[in-house]
Amino acid sequence: MAAGSEVYVLGGYQTDFARNWTKENKHFSALMRESVVGALEACEIAPEEVESAHVGNFAAELYCMQGHLGAFFTEVDPAFSGLPTGRHEAACASGSIALLAASAEIEAGRYDLQAVVGIEQMKTVDSGKGGTYLGTAAWFEEEAEGIDAPFPKLFGRLGDEYDKRYGLKDEHLAEISKINYANAKLNPNAQTRTWYMNKDHALVRTDDNAAIGGRIRISDCSQVTDGAVTLFLASREYAEKWAKGTGKKLSEIPRIKGWGHNTARLKFDDKVAESANDQYVLPHVRSTVTSAMKRAGIEGVDGVDGIETHDCFTTSEYMAIDHFGITAPGESWKAVEEGWLEIDGKHPINPSGGLIGAGHPVGATGCRQVLDSYLQVTGQAGAYQVEGAKNFQTLNIGGSGTTSVSFVVGVD
Amino acid sequence: MSTLSPKEMRQLVASRKIERVVVLGANGTMGYGSAALFTQAVPEVTFLARTKEKAEDGLAAAIKQVRSPTVANRAKTGSYDDDLAAACAGADLIFEALTEDFDLKKDIFDKVEASRRDDSIVATVTSGLSINKLCEGRSDSFRKNFLGLHFFNPPNVIVGTELIAGDETDPELVDFIDAYSTVLLGREMVRTADTPAFAGNRVGFKVMNEVCQLAEEIGVALTDKLVGPYTGRAMTPLATVDLVGWDIHRAIVDNVYANTTEAHDEARETNKLPAYMATLMEKGVLGNKSGGGFFKKDGKTRLILDPASGDYTPADEIKLPELGYIDEVAALHRDGRYKEGMAVFASASGEHAKIARKVIAGYVAYAFQRVGEVTESIDGIDRIMGMGFNVAPPSVLVDALGAQATVDMIAEAGLEVPAALAEAAKTGEPKRFFNHTRINVGKFFVAE
């Protein structure tokens, strides 16, 4: 029985998001196995100790013709036979929802040690088909059916809404893209770490950086990515035991200090209509962020040392800047111009490269954000380490700002 | 790899401005690829070649390679005769990427020396010529500011990079270039000694040339199958030689052969270029760049070279022996069961499995024997093989096979067992040789 309601993050493992598992001729099961085995080894945990497991995934049925994903744990190790498992889906927020479910079970005292896997294999199909599959994260019949690249268009409209309310310049979006790509070069598991990018390129207006959804160009987009991330969450009781066994101090083990979770109207137009008189374009996202801060006992964004946010497009990061409270609503451009978002800046955002730079295997992203936050607050982020980080916050969004989840991961 | 913290590296990078880079030999593959890489981080990169037209060809190739017209926004072009002096006089970094000809490089350095500022950095992308010899007889400031910065081809895709200091290179400059390349160019830096072909090509081309020798004995198709992806490589070795180019391959192995002795390189003979390759090269066979090497295409038909005759046979007419163990290994890799796969490899019966094990054993043993010579530890060799050659680092193979099985494999091949592996087999320590927990080792074990 869990001794308290605290949820500890013991660590985890990320697959290299630059990999193409179809080209490696590998099955979905290999992606899951590498991630889980990697995490077991990284955390020095024996499979027999794991009490329950959750999988976050968006659309394996479409991309891989595969469902019943929790059951794949039994293929990873014989010790997992009989393990309680399940799968969670909330579009691009699937990984975070799996983490919420696992942490709730720890808080409820059901289990002391849980594995959470976020996973998506997307390079099984061409980009056209993949774009259609992603459209199921919107209201498909009304917002995606028969539309090429529906999500770039939806997030292009987010930029349009900012432009309408506050004004928006392409150069600010290009700067966001530039920072994410530059940070990705420091991340050994980032998908775009070898891609050519600078601000000049992000501002190119030719076919080399084609528009694919209104103001959204290739350089504004996150990637089609294969990847998996496994994390281990534990109760205080298990964390104490594990700390002794691995020679760590309990105080050095990060906790999920706070969380926020909200769901807004599914259709983008409905969300915008609802927020017409609100200073925030996506108030449910704002509420998710502030809920997590409040639960963590943090008064505002100055209380976190960095952010891993959902930049599925540059417009979503632009939105996140003011929704986190880094600037007043509509003034995200100030943070961009002042250099606050860079790794050594006042409010580093996506030192990992984020979704644009690190990659976006849809169901894995929420878990990747928490793993990167864990790496930051334990000083293990390598070349993209934010010096002295103690608290990191995530924001993971499913759909066009529909399901939002935020975590504050930190050490005391 | 620098020992500085990430923040210290970023501060070091900020401490010195690199605003103008000159690339010499900018029409060659390494030249234009490297020049494109620099334009990501530098406001002005001058592409220089024998003629301005050739430099412009290099710029066009760079734009095509990285798919960005913005390379041109930061690029200038020119010829050695008309523009080198002025370009080098204003350059913060002069990057030499001429063909692997010692005398050619010496000649261009004469021109560089005559025009460069005392504080400018001079780097060579040589894939294995001696850094100390290349700057022999130069001024103090040249030798102090000269180093090897060995990118792999294509530089915009392959991040593994060797950094080679000469005896008189300023250590602070080495730290700076390490940090600069890591932070701004996204490189995985490996510091190597100034030894023939440095670390990556020394170990990597030894294996490829041994496979070229093997192809003469058992045929091209069988050789490439036996040392195929299941042994820990994305591309088969003979296809890699075709991609690299037979002339480049010869330049590297000849350099190693000429500059090593049996006394300090136990596998020197594996670097001897097979006679059939030299003969075919005289007839213009250079690999992909000449339209074919070990392999070529006739429409959709893949043709395979007969080393003895120089003739080509359609791939589907070549009968290979039963190699069921390879299918078994590949099936295990497909499910991510890499250790189980390598266990099947280690225990497979038959002469062909034994041949394949000999090559892999030779690779691992040779790499471990080079520790202390080409790099301080096995880690440098591991990282350049993984991130430069895109093949399983020797330590990854040892970890997958287990130390005892590796030792057995090396002994079966009749090779001397490196002390570190013998010790690990005896004591069980270290439990793991490859300790980069954030690098996926599974990516090296391709399933087909």
Image (tube, helix red, strand yellow):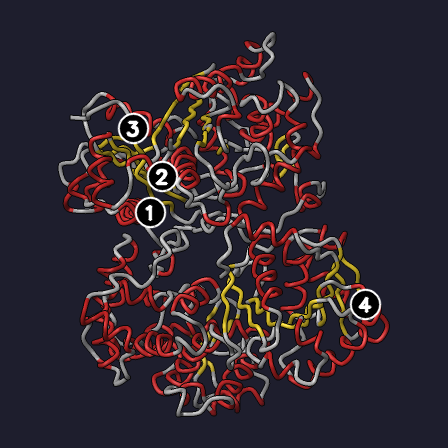
Badge 1, how many Cα within 10 Å: few under 14, some, many 20+? many
- Residue B89: assigned label: 4
Q: Give the spatial CA distance, label 4 vs label 2.
A: 53 Å
Q: Quadrant of residue B316?
A: bottom left
Q: Secondary structure at mark 3?
A: loop
Inspect this view and state whether residue A7 appears.
yes
> Looking at the picture, do discs 1 and 4 lie on one chain?
no
* Nearest to N terminus: mark 3 or mark 2: 3
Q: Give the spatial CA distance, label 1 vs label 3.
A: 26 Å
Q: Quadrant of residue B127?
A: bottom right
Horizontal and vertical percent position of residue B161: 53, 65
Inspect this view and state whether residue A124 appears.
no
Q: Give the spatial CA distance, label 3 vs label 2.
A: 22 Å
Q: Is residue B355 left or right of residue A386?
A: left
Horizontal and vertical percent position of residue B184: 61, 53
Report which residue position mark 1 lands on.
A31
Q: For marks 3 and 2, give the one nearer the viewer.
A: 3
Amino acid type, mark 3: Val
Q: For marks 1 and 3, give the one nearer the viewer.
A: 3
Amino acid type, mark 2: Ile
* Nearest to N terminus: mark 2 or mark 1: 1
Above-or-below relation of A151 to A165: below
Question: Pointer 3 indicates a residue of which chain?
Answer: A
Report which residue position mark 3 lands on.
A7
| Residue at the spot 27% in from the left edge and 76% down from the top edge | B321
Q: Secondary structure at mark 2?
A: strand
Question: Pointer 1 indicates a residue of which chain?
Answer: A
| Residue at the spot 50% in from the left edge and 68% down from the top edge | B191
